[in-house]
Amino acid sequence: MYIVIPASNVLSRAAELVHIAHGAHTNNLQLSGAKSAEIIFSSCRHNRLESHPPELSDISRVATITKLGVTVTNHLSVSEHVSGVST
């Protein structure tokens, strides 16, 4: 499962996750913080320092994710995936 939260709603991340956890519990499922990760996508073209929200207590923040065998970075680049496939 993926949840995408726009930057304009970044302060509601914790509430969104509580809502999802409640829905999962209602459907006899469980949301595992240990298996979850947060990635913040941003443009690599801007050389300014971006202020990211503080990390959530039970979810780790990562710079890359691999889903369905494709590695994507937090700058929406697949160059890491391409270099891994070609070697």
Image (spheres, rainbow, N blue to C red):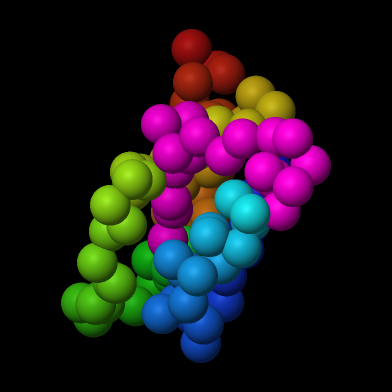
Within the magenta stretch, is there residue 30? Answer: yes
> Relative to 24, is 41 above or below?
below
Residue at the image position 51 percent from the left and 87 percent from the top: 8
Residue at the image position 79 percent from the left and 42 percent from the top: 27
**Could you tell me residue 4's position as x and y percent?**
62, 63
Q: Among all residues in the image, which is located at the extreme left?
A: 49
> Relative to 21, is 85 above or below?
above
The quarter of the displayed image where residue 64 is located: top left
**Could you tell me residue 81's position as x and y percent?**
53, 30
The answer to which of 47 and 41 lies nearer the viewer is 41
The quarter of the displayed image where residue 67 is located: top right
Q: Is 48 left or right of 38, judged from the image as shown?
A: left
Q: Which residues are magenta?
A: 23-40
Residue at the image position 69 percent from the left and 45 percent from the top: 24
Q: Among all residues in the image, which is located at the extreme right?
A: 27
Q: Magenta span: helix, strand or loop, mainly?
A: loop
> Relative to 50, is 87 above or below?
above
Within the magenta stretch, is there residue 69? Answer: no
**Could you tell me residue 38's position as x and y percent?**
43, 51
The answer to which of 48 and 3 lies nearer the viewer is 3
- Does residue 29 appear anywhere in the picture? yes
**Could you tell me residue 10's position as x and y percent?**
45, 77
